[in-house]
Amino acid sequence: MQAARGASLTGDQDTSQPTRPSGPRGRMLVVFALVALTAYAVDVVSKIIAVDRLTDHPDVEIVGHWLVLHLVRNPGAAFSTGTAYTEVFTIVAMVAVVIVLYLARRLGSLGWAFALGFLLAGVAGNLTDRLVREPGPLRGHVIDFFMLPHWPVFNVADMCIDTAAVLILIQVYRGIRIDGTRVVRE
């Protein structure tokens, strides 16, 4: 009897080594993880620096009045709405993280890998603030510090969420599903 290359003749499987995803789906998971971890790290570090350098200091003009560093502690959601619902936003963010991680298991498209990576980074970045910052767990205020004229103050996590939204819309418009298959249009 002849076994396929690398197969055991006795049928015993070597389970001593952890299995890693391989092939296209495995590569998509790696891209997803790298995007998520890198963007999350940039968000967390930028907030630490912003709090350190901007607390009790005047605003810093980066590009005249067009881009200013201005520290804001935001208890609400986008555009500082719903400031009385911080705990609800925290729970929604926790659920969103779980959903993104669940969906990532099906990745088969590079566009979706980037989109979900940015989405996870953004949601997790703001969730981290809600969990660890004052006034306390589940009620922490999100650190925002980029200010444009006639626009709410925002942070790197917010930019990641916006980038994810654009990438998701592009993938949907192109008819590409998370698993990489295309929607057949008639």
Image (cartoon, rainbow, N blue to C red):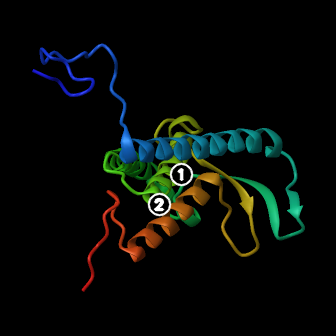
* Residue bearing mark 2: 111
Q: What residue do we see at 30% from left, 13% from top?
A: 16
Placement of 89 over or under 82, stated as above or below? above
Can you say which quadrant of the picture contains the C terminus?
Answer: bottom left
SS under mark 1: helix
SS under mark 2: helix
Placement of 22 over or under 97, stated as above or below? above
29 and 15: which is toward the camera = 15
Residue 81: image location, x then y, percent: 52, 64
Q: The disc labelled 2 sits on which kind of residue?
A: Gly
117 and 89: which is toward the camera = 117
Q: Is residue 158 left or right of residue 88?
A: right
On residue 122, which mark appears?
1
Q: Is residue 130 left or right of residue 87?
A: right
Residue 65: image location, x then y, percent: 86, 70
On residue 47, which mark appears?
none
Cα distance, mark 1 to mark 2? 17 Å
- Binning the other alpha carbons within 10 Å of mark 2 as few (below 14), some (14 to 19) or many (20 upward) gives many
Dot 1 or dot 2: first in sequence order is 2
Q: What residue do we see at 85% from left, 56% from top?
A: 59
Residue 49: image location, x then y, percent: 76, 40
Q: The disc labelled 1 sits on which kind of residue?
A: Gly
Q: Quadrant of residue 149?
A: bottom right
Direction left: furthest residue = 1
Residue 18: image location, x then y, percent: 34, 21
- Binning the other alpha carbons within 10 Å of mark 1 as few (below 14), some (14 to 19) or many (20 upward) gives many
Can you say which quadrant of the picture contains the N terminus?
Answer: top left
